[in-house]
Image (cartoon, grey):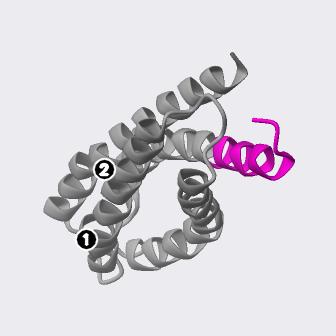
Amino acid sequence: MNDPLVRLLFLAHLGSCLFMVGAIWIVQVVHYPLFDSIGVREFPSYAQRHVTLITGVVAPTMLIEGVTAVLLFWCRPAGVSRGFLGAGLVLLAVIWSSTAFVQVPCHDVFTQGFDFVVHQRLVSTNWIRTTAWSLRGALVLWMTWSSLR
């Protein structure tokens, strides 16, 4: 990994991926389970504020992670298998699909009010993203190790 641009891409990818691993674990273990502790009257505005604030934190990082994942697939760092990079892209597709088709619709319901069944669905299905990002984190760390050898 001698090309400075590839090294920069890889560092941005590593940082953004590991940031998202930490973020998703906090959301999964702390944040989402606390949704049922918000008062019924306050919940719709809380849910809307949550979407606005969390989007400002995770959207740019997810975008950096996605763009760098695609670029690294085409500008493969020395010592890093294209198979690992492809597996990382597949995991990203799982994460983004789950976000768009499962978690976002749950959050849309919450802007109208708290729904116990939707809350249970959100917490249980978010394990898809938590698992996929954890696997991505391990994969990116393995790629880092491989590139340093």
Numbered label attached to residue 126: 2
Residue 146, image x and y in percent? 60, 22
Q: Which residues are magenta?
A: 1-16
Vertical side of 100 occupied by 127: above or below: above
Vertical side of 95 occupied by 24: above or below: above
Task: Measure how far apart labels 2 and 1 are at the Cα level.
Answer: 12 Å
Which sits earlier in the primary sequence, circle 2 or circle 1? 1
Numbered label attached to residue 30: none
The residue carrying pointer 1 sits among few (fewer than 14), some (14 to 19) or many (20 or more) residues within 10 Å by Cα, namely few
For the residue pair 125 and 115, the one nearer the viewer reads as: 125
For the residue pair 50 and 82, the one nearer the viewer reads as: 82
For the residue pair 115 and 52, the one nearer the viewer reads as: 52
What residue do we see at 49% from left, 72% from top?
51
Is residue 2 part of the magenta span, yes or no? yes
Q: Label 1, on which residue? A: 101
Residue 46, image x and y in percent? 48, 71
Residue 87, image x and y in percent? 37, 42
Q: Is residue 20 left or right of residue 149?
A: left
What residue do we see at 40% from left, 38% from top?
83
Secondary structure, mark 1, is: helix
Quadrant of the drawing holding the N terminus: top right
What residue do we see at 72% from left, 50% from top?
12
Is residue 77 part of the magenta span, yes or no? no
For the residue pair 97 and 67, the one nearer the viewer reads as: 67
Q: Is residue 61 left or right of residue 40?
A: right
Secondary structure, mark 2, is: helix
The residue at the far left in this view is 117
What amino acid type should be assigned to the residue bearing mark 1?
Answer: Phe
Residue 137, image x and y in percent? 51, 34
Vertical side of 6 occupied by 122: above or below: below
Q: Give the quarter of the image for residue 65.
A: bottom right
